[in-house]
């Protein structure tokens, strides 16, 4: 029976990973497609490959958090089969909820679904005490803080671009002068994340200070390269030149978003799978199990497959809707989203990339960068987010009871 | 598809503002033809152009309502929403004023004295200049709010200055016309009143165009 639970868990995890690729990658890539920074084909390639890379290189930390910190396994059960069934139920319920949300066009977050589903299992089997409410509260707070932080960053960034570049009488010259700093800042954050968060950093035994030094050095070099690259390749044009500079930057920020998305969201699919796999192997419910690389690889592969098989349609649709986000706006949105998500990922908090992107768009809107953006949607999203937790928990309870009746 | 981003973006007000400004531009030749038909005593043609103007004004109203309806509470714009509403109200009043002139003319068939005709046509033309300048101003404003470029802001400011200049010229002609009308020995006081009120209503066209320009200036203020 355990083998079949493992297989079912893998299938549900694969479906979740595919769904993340199919539906969620668009939220990061669409602004670049809408602003014509990259073509649809390039977006699909970047989204697929860098989401995969982010999932594999940066994913393990968040995966561990979902599994370890929301539930207190010792208070739920010592029966490893019950734990496997519970995690499978959570995965199936989250998959069902994500499927229903996709079908009914509810803007529901994959992250919130899986967290809600796991909480549901914890409640039915272990009761209220089995949930680490403090950790759950931290996660819920991160769901509120991450879009606000992304919005704040995007607001600051777009306001800076607006005041210092767009409104300047020498737009192109100013953009050229400031471009290396913006490029350097973006790369600084990417390199710092890579050094501090990936196995590369731990293998090289890099301290925080060394990582900061290395990131600074690399970003300074990138800044210089960006200056010469832009100076040589972008024709001097006060009207169109500025957007052209940011169009090029947006190619990189799109990569940044895709990478951050993979790092953060792969956990939604493979977190419970990794737990089921660990229990299957050890026949014990242990709170500390390393996440095997092959599971991260499978998660990454299916996220990429989701992008390749269905995500391109979503990217195309969303991209055609948000054409008002020009390159300067898109750059600010991407930067705010990715930084917020990577930071949350670094802290081990499973935040929603979609919600960070929504926050970033609102931030640019508040800075006057979007022709018309509906702030009211935020309340509706918050409502969906509030109902996602119980609505994902409920099917988990039902599925778990059915599975328990059938197999135990 | 369950992307929250899809629901986040609302229709920009500028396509509808431009559509409304197009109606304002379209009404100019119709209005001029109506006044000429009236001066010629061709009431058949006058009514034809009068009806066309009513249709255009109704179109303008519908665009204005559509624009307001698509900007509920919570929608963020690059400009103050209430300034935008005040702007569209003034731009729409330009159309209302054009219609009011023709409504007023239709109430009485007054023979315009020959010495007045030229200045009356001059006032019509000056009013129409300011009316035609609305569309380029809105178009430049759309580009400005897209690019935030100082150059485009200057274009908007120049359009605003031009509308103010036309309004000033229209005021000058209006004052002269009023003085002439008061000096003219009308046999029928109703005709005197009818023409004086006509001139005042004609003056309203550029007044509202200028008000709209002032609101635009407030919208692009930094």
Image (cartoon, coloured by chain):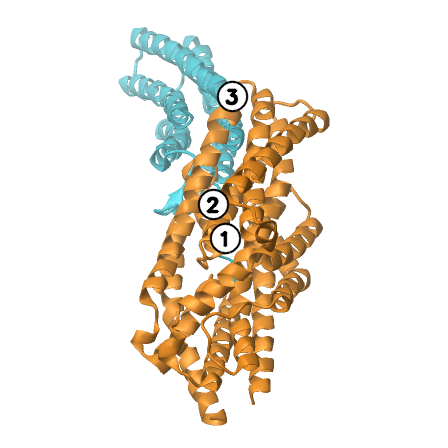
Q: Nearer the viewer, residue A337 or B193?
A: A337
Which residue is identified by label 1? B5
Q: In which quadrant of the rendered view does residue B220 lie?
A: top left
Taking the image as shown, residue B117 lies to the left or right of residue A170, namely left
Query: SS class of the residue under badge 3?
Result: loop
Query: SS class of the residue under badge 2?
Result: helix
Q: Is residue B72 above or below residue B148?
A: below
Query: For the residue carrying disc 1, how many other residues have a C-alpha within 10 Å: few (<14), some (14-19), or many (20+)?
Result: many
Q: Quadrant of the N terminus of chain A?
A: bottom right
Which chain hosts label 2? A
Query: For the residue carrying disc 3, how many other residues have a C-alpha within 10 Å: few (<14), some (14-19), or many (20+)?
Result: some
Colour given to chain A in the rendered image: orange
Which residue is identified by label 2? A361
Which chain hosts label 1? B
Residue A254 x/y as whole percent? 60, 46
Which chain hosts label 3? A
Cα gap from disc 3 to disc 2, whole angstroms: 23 Å
Residue B86 x/y as whole percent? 35, 33
**Disc 1, disc 2: CB below 8 Å?**
yes
Q: In which quadrant of the rendered view does residue A119 lie?
A: bottom left
Query: For the residue carrying disc 2, how many other residues have a C-alpha within 10 Å: few (<14), some (14-19), or many (20+)?
Result: many
User: Would you say residue A233 is visible in this rendering?
Assistant: yes
Query: SS class of the residue under badge 1?
Result: helix
Cα gap from disc 1 to disc 2, whole angstroms: 9 Å
Taking the image as shown, residue A162 lies to the left or right of residue A385, namely right
Q: Nearer the viewer, residue A248 or A323?
A: A248
Asked if both marks, 1 and 2, belong to the same chain, the answer given is no
């Amino acid at each position: 029976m355990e083998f079949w639970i493992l297989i079912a868990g893998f299938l549900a995890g694969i479906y979740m990973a595919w769904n993340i690729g199919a539906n969620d990658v668009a939220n990061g890539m669409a602004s670049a497609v809408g602003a014509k920074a990259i073509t649809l084909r390039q977006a699909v390639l970047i989204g697929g490959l860098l989401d995969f890379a982010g999932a594999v290189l940066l994913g393990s930390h968040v995966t561990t958090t979902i599994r370890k910190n929301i539930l207190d396994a010792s208070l739920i059960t010592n029966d490893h089969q019950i734990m496997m069934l519970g995690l499978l139920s959570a995965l199936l319920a989250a998959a069902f909820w994500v499927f229903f949300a996709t079908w009914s066009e509810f803007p529901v977050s994959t992250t919130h679904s899986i967290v809600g589903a796991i909480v549901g299992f914890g409640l039915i089997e272990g009761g209220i005490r089995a949930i680490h409410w403090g950790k759950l509260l931290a996660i819920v707070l991160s769901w509120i803080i991450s879009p606000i932080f992304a919005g704040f960053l995007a607001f600051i960034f777009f306001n800076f671009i607006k005041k210092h570049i767009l409104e300047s009488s020498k737009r192109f010259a100013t953009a050229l002068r400031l471009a290396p700093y913006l490029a350097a800042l973006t790369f600084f954050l990417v390199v710092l994340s890579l050094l501090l968060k990936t196995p590369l950093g731990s293998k090289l035994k890099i301290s925080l200070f060394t990582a900061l030094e290395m990131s600074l050095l690399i970003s300074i070099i990138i800044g210089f390269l960006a200056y010469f690259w832009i100076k040589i390749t972008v024709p001097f044009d006060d009207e169109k030149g500025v957007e052209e500079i940011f169009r090029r930057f947006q190619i990189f920020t799109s990569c940044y978003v895709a990478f951050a998305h993979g790092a953060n969201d792969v956990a939604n699919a493979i977190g419970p799978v990794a737990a089921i796999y660990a229990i299957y192997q050890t026949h014990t419910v242990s709170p500390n199990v390393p996440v095997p690389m092959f599971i991260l690889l499978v998660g990454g592969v299916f996220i990429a497959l989701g992008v390749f098989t269905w995500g391109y349609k979503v990217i195309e649709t969303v991209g055609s809707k948000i054409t008002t986000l020009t390159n300067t706006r898109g750059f600010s949105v991407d930067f705010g989203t990715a930084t917020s998500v990577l930071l949350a990922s670094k802290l081990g908090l499973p935040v929603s990339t979609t919600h960070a992107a929504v926050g970033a768009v609102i931030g640019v809107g508040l800075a006057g960068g979007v022709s018309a953006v509906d702030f009211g949607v935020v309340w509706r999203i918050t409502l969906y987010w509030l109902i996602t937790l119980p609505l994902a928990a409920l099917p988990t309870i039902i599925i778990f009871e059915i599975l328990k009746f059938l197999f135990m | 598809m369950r992307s929250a981003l899809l629901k986040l973006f609302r229709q920009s007000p500028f396509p509808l503002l431009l559509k409304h400004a197009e109606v304002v531009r379209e009404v100019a030749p119709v209005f001029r033809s109506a006044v000429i038909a009236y001066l010629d005593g061709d009431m058949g043609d006058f009514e034809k152009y009068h009806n066309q103007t009513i249709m255009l004004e109704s179109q303008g109203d519908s665009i204005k309502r559509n624009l307001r309806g698509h900007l509920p509470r919570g929608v963020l714009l690059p400009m103050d929403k209430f300034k935008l509403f005040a702007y569209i109200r003034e731009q729409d009043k330009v159309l209302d004023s054009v219609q009011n002139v023709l409504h007023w003319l239709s109430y009485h068939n007054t023979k315009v004295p020959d010495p007045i005709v030229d200045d009356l046509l001059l006032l019509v033309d000056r009013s129409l200049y300011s009316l035609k300048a609305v569309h380029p101003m809105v178009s430049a404003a759309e580009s400005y709010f897209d690019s935030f470029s100082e150059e485009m802001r200057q274009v908007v400011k120049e359009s605003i200055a031009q509308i103010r200049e036309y309004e000033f010229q229209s005021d000058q002609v209006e004052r002269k016309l009023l003085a002439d009308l008061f000096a003219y020995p009308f046999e029928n006081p109703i005709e005197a009143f009818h023409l004086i009120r006509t001139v005042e209503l004609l003056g309203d066209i550029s007044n509202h165009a200028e008000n709209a320009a002032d609101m635009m200036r407030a919208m692009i203020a930094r």
